[in-house]
């Protein structure tokens, strides 16, 4: 297996993992923002 193919495989794996992580992070952020806005409106 040559170095370039290995490098691209690593890049793809990293991108997939980052995408999964960011989608989880985005969901968490939306929940926190929604909760924060609800608290502000409640006050």
Image (cartoon, rainbow, N blue to C red):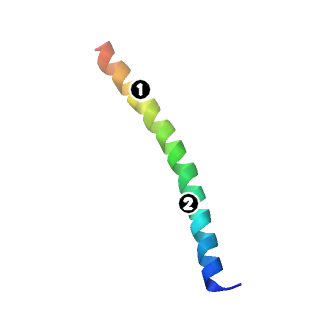
Residue 7 left/right relative to 35 = right
Tell me which residue sits at (41%, 25%) in the image: 35
**Residue 16 percent across, percent down from the top left:** 60, 57
Disc 1 secondary structure class? helix
Disc 1 versus disc 2: distance between alpha carbons?
Answer: 28 Å
Whether 22 is drawn above or below 13: the answer is: above
Q: What's the mark number on residue 43?
A: none
Of residues 26 and 7, which is closer to you in this image?
7
* Precedes in sequence: disc 1 or disc 2: 2
Give the quadrant of residue 11.
bottom right
Tell me which residue sits at (42%, 32%) in the image: 32
Give the quadrant of residue 15.
bottom right
Whether 14 is drawn above or below 36: the answer is: below
Tell me which residue sits at (54%, 50%) in the image: 21
Q: Which residue is mark 2?
A: 15
Q: Are marks 1 and 2 in contact (CB under 8 Å)?
A: no
Q: Categorize mark 2 by other alpha carbons within 10 Å: few (<14), some (14-19), many (20+).
A: few
**Residue 29 percent across, percent down from the top left:** 43, 37
Q: Residue furthest top?
A: 42
**Residue 28 percent across, percent down from the top left:** 48, 37
| Figure quadrant of the N terminus | bottom right
Q: Categorize mark 1 by other alpha carbons within 10 Å: few (<14), some (14-19), many (20+).
A: few
Q: Which residue is mark 1?
A: 34
Whether 8 is drawn above or below 37: the answer is: below
| Figure quadrant of the C terminus | top left
Tell me which residue sits at (39%, 30%) in the image: 33
Of residues 5 and 14, which is closer to you in this image?
5
């Amino acid at each position: 297996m040559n170095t370039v193919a290995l490098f691209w495989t690593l890049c793809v794996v990293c991108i997939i993992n980052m995408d999964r992580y960011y989608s989880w992070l985005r969901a968490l952020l939306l929940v926190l923002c929604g909760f924060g806005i609800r608290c502000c409106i409640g006050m």
